[in-house]
Structures are given as structure tokens and as C-alpha cells.
């Protein structure tokens, strides 16, 4: 009983079969058609992507000191909570 070597042999056969089949498929695919179809697919994705939208994050009472904001110049700041008597 040599189960360790037997399972390694089966794994080796599976890997070899997988790569031989994938190499066979690569020989059947024309490089020109592959690059051309990839270019068309990228152009379709580029034109159909959703527009980006700005999300405004306003400070709440619960997270006022946890959120750090960055302005147009690149300066980071945060707000501090302070209770006042009315």
C-alpha cells in the first residue's frame, strides 16, 4: 500500500492532461482574432461604464470625531464634538 505516491501520480496525470488540453486549444486560437476581440471587449466596457458620482459624507453626532475629511488642496481635517448649553 503506497497511497501517498499513488495520489501524487493521479494528481500529476490530472495536471498533465489539463495543460496538454489547454495548449491544444491555444494552438487552435489565432492571435489576431484573440487580440482583436479583446480590444473590442475593452472598448465596449469603456463606453458602457457607469458615470462616477460624488458622494457627500456629512458628519453625524455618532461619528463626528471618527471621520477624516480631505479638502481640494489636500489638507486633512476632522471635526470635534462640543456640547453647548442652549
Image (cartoon, rainbow, N blue to C red):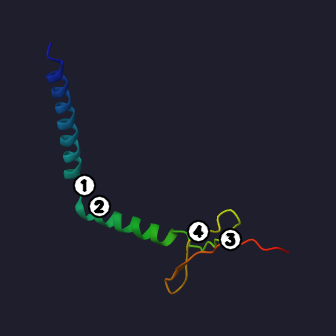
Which residue corresponds to the image point at 25% horizontal and 65% vertical from the top-left?
32
**Mark 4 and mark 2: span between their CA atoms?**
47 Å
Q: Look at the numbered discs 3 and 4 and tell me whether their residues touch, using CB distance below 8 Å.
A: no
The residue mark sitting in front, 3 or 4, is 3
**Mark 1 and mark 2: span between their CA atoms?**
7 Å
Q: Nearer the viewer, residue 65 or 17?
A: 65
68 is higher (above) or lower (below) than 2: below
Point out the image quarter for the C terminus. bottom right
**Mark 3 and mark 4: span between their CA atoms?**
12 Å
**Mark 1 and mark 3: span between their CA atoms?**
64 Å
**Mark 4 — residue?**
67
Mark sitting earlier along the chain (4/1) = 1
Dot 3: within a 10 Å radius of its alpha carbon, few (fewer than 14), some, or many (20 or more) residues? Answer: few
**Mark 2 — residue?**
34
* Mark 1, secondary structure of its residue: loop
**Mark 1 — residue?**
29
Quadrant location of residue 59? Answer: bottom right
Mark sitting earlier along the chain (1/3) = 1
The residue mark sitting in front, 4 or 1, is 4
Which residue corresponds to the image point at 40% horizontal and 64% vertical from the top-left?
41
Which residue corresponds to the image point at 23% horizontal and 61% vertical from the top-left?
31
In percent of width and height, residue 45 lies at: 46, 67
Q: Nearer the viewer, residue 43 or 57?
A: 57
In percent of width and height, residue 84 lies at: 78, 74
Mark sitting earlier along the chain (1/2) = 1
Mark sitting earlier along the chain (3/2) = 2
The residue mark sitting in front, 4 or 2, is 4
Which residue corresponds to the image point at 20% horizontal and 30% vertical from the top-left?
11
Dot 2: within a 10 Å radius of its alpha carbon, few (fewer than 14), some, or many (20 or more) residues? Answer: few
80 is higher (above) or lower (below) than 32: below
**Mark 3 — residue?**
81
User: As drawn, is 64 to the left or to the right of 84?
Assistant: left
Amino acid at each position: 500500500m503506497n497511497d501517498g505516491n499513488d495520489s501524487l501520480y493521479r494528481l500529476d496525470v490530472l495536471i498533465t492532461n489539463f495543460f496538454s488540453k489547454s495548449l491544444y486549444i491555444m494552438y487552435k486560437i489565432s492571435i489576431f482574432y484573440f487580440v482583436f476581440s479583446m480590444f473590442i471587449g475593452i472598448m465596449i466596457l469603456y463606453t458602457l461604464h457607469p458615470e462616477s458620482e460624488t458622494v457627500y459624507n456629512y458628519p453625524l453626532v455618532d461619528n463626528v470625531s471618527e471621520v477624516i475629511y480631505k479638502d481640494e488642496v489636500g489638507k486633512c481635517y476632522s471635526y470635534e464634538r462640543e456640547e453647548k448649553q442652549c
